[in-house]
């Protein structure tokens, strides 16, 4: 288990006041909150920040943590000395919040041993679980079964927080959107009033070709200057397979062609937008240069006319 | 052992006030505040009739995270959520070229 330097994580001195800690936490939480931040490692950073705050904002936990001393380095292998927390009374179990916060082994070792057992109303259903899953766009388009893997936090016999791998074969409905919740009835914790449910929040993996906005799918479609100028019927990929599209004559780069109902399936289905991108052949041969020169001479064309230059 | 038979995932479902509060691990009263603030707009005349959608569930969970983890003010929570939605729409549009 690695030692965590909570002061370093929040960027405060070991003798920082509670107000300084609060200010540092708020600033970092705003920067790295996964709902707000676009930083690549936002989720990991936010968990660390939240965990550090959970300890340092609480006078008792902070005092107990300080007891460990400052000689430890972040990342150093760590085992708490016996009786390190004697005399400290923590205010209940680790704050699970609404999301069942995912704290580190280090935190669980120090503060997670007072796990709660039972105590909930007898006839209530078991707890619902929530998880996020990443899907390929094609999987959402087609629906069908997918094997997903989840890490489930569990309290072991000695009261420690441990993670169990859980693998599920899930039948996804067609046309799920990014950010959408799907429910797997009865896949939460078993309970006296029936098992809880498992809710999955769907997100898409970035796709090399397509971009998705709600149920609409966007694709940049390269075309030749003569296809754009003269019009043409060309092939375009879609998540459902290749289709033929008519490019109208005199199309410019940026022109959007809409294929109605070819976005994510649903009621109503989304649309597929093809954004034309005119790509010029390079003038690397004498013949190519000659053709461009012919155009320059024979086409009266000034794209900067409107700029007044 | 997990079953290898696929478990069906529903994308269309509704939750009552109690079910939504239970699954978000919050008090029903807190969900009522979200409705009072116009952050959630379930159909139904009284709390007993309210039907929350899958989208409401996602929004309620985001609202709770902002409220709990950033100690956001309830009055501006709706504004933050709307702005987040708008920013993601604009980002998606930028990416789409």
Image (tube, rainbow, N blue to C red):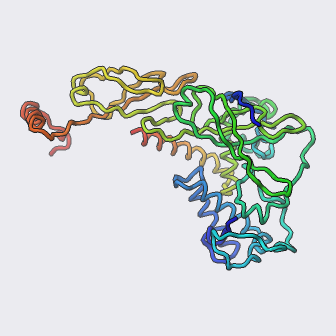
In the rendered image, the residue lying farthest to the right is: A122
Q: Residue A21's x, y, as percent?
A: 66, 70
In the rendered image, the residue lying farthest to the front is: B1
Q: Residue B80's x, y, as percent?
A: 60, 49
Q: Is A304 drawn above or below residue B66 in the view shown?
A: above
Give the quadrant of residue B37. top right
* Quadrant (top left, top right, bottom left, bottom right) of the N terminus of chain A: bottom right
Give the quadrant of residue A13. bottom right
Front residue (pair B41, A151): A151
The residue lying at 22 percent from left, 23 percent from top is: A230
Give the quadrant of residue A237. top left
The residue lying at 59 percent from left, 64 percent from top is: A27
Q: Is A83 drawn above or below residue A194 in the view shown?
A: below
Q: Is residue A237 left or right of residue B16?
A: left
Front residue (pair B65, B9): B9
Q: Is residue B72 left or right of residue B49?
A: left
Q: Is residue B21 left or right of residue A30?
A: right
The residue lying at 85 percent from left, 72 percent from top is: A88
Q: Residue B16's x, y, as percent?
A: 78, 33
């Amino acid at each position: 288990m690695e030692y965590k330097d909570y002061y370093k994580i929040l960027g405060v001195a070991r003798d920082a006041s509670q107000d300084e800690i609060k200010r540092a936490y708020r600033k970092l939480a705003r920067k790295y909150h996964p709902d707000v931040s676009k930083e690549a490692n936002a989720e990991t950073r936010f968990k660390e920040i939240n965990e550090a705050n959970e300890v340092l904002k609480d006078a008792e936990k902070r005092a107990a943590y300080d007891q460990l001393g400052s000689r430890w380095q972040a990342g150093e292998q760590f085992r708490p000395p016996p009786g390190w927390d004697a005399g400290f009374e923590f205010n209940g179990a680790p704050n699970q919040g609404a999301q069942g916060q995912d704290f580190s082994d280090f935190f669980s070792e120090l503060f997670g041993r007072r796990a709660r057992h039972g105590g909930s109303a007898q006839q209530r259903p078991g707890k619902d679980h929530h998880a996020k899953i990443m899907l390929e766009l094609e999987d959402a388009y087609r629906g069908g079964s997918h094997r997903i893997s989840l890490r489930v936090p569990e309290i072991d016999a000695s009261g420690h927080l441990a993670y169990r791998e859980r693998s599920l074969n899930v039948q996804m409905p067609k046309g799920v959107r990014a950010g959408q919740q799907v429910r797997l009835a009865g896949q939460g914790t078993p309970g006296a009033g029936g098992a809880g449910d498992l809710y999955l929040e769907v997100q898409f993996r970035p796709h090399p070709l397509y971009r998705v906005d709600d149920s609409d799918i966007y694709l940049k479609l390269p075309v030749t200057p003569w296809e754009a100028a003269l019009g043409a019927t060309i092939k375009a990929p879609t998540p459902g397979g290749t289709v033929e599209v008519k490019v109208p004559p005199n199309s410019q780069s940026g022109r959007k062609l809409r294929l109605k109902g070819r976005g994510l399936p649903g009621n109503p289905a989304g649309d597929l937008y093809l954004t034309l991108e005119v790509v010029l052949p390079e003038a690397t041969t004498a013949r190519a240069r000659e053709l461009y020169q012919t155009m320059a001479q024979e086409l009266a064309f000034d794209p900067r006319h409107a700029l007044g230059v | 052992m997990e079953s290898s038979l696929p478990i069906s995932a529903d994308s269309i479902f509704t939750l009552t006030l109690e079910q939504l509060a239970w699954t978000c691990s919050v008090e029903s009263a807190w969900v009522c505040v979200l409705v009072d603030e116009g952050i959630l707009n379930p159909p139904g005349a009284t709390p007993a009739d309210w039907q929350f959608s899958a989208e409401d569930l996602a929004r309620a969970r985001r609202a709770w995270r902002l409220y709990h983890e950033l100690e956001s003010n309830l009055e501006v929570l709706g504004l933050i959520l709307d702005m987040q939605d708008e920013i993601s729409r604009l980002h998606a549009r930028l990416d789409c070229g």
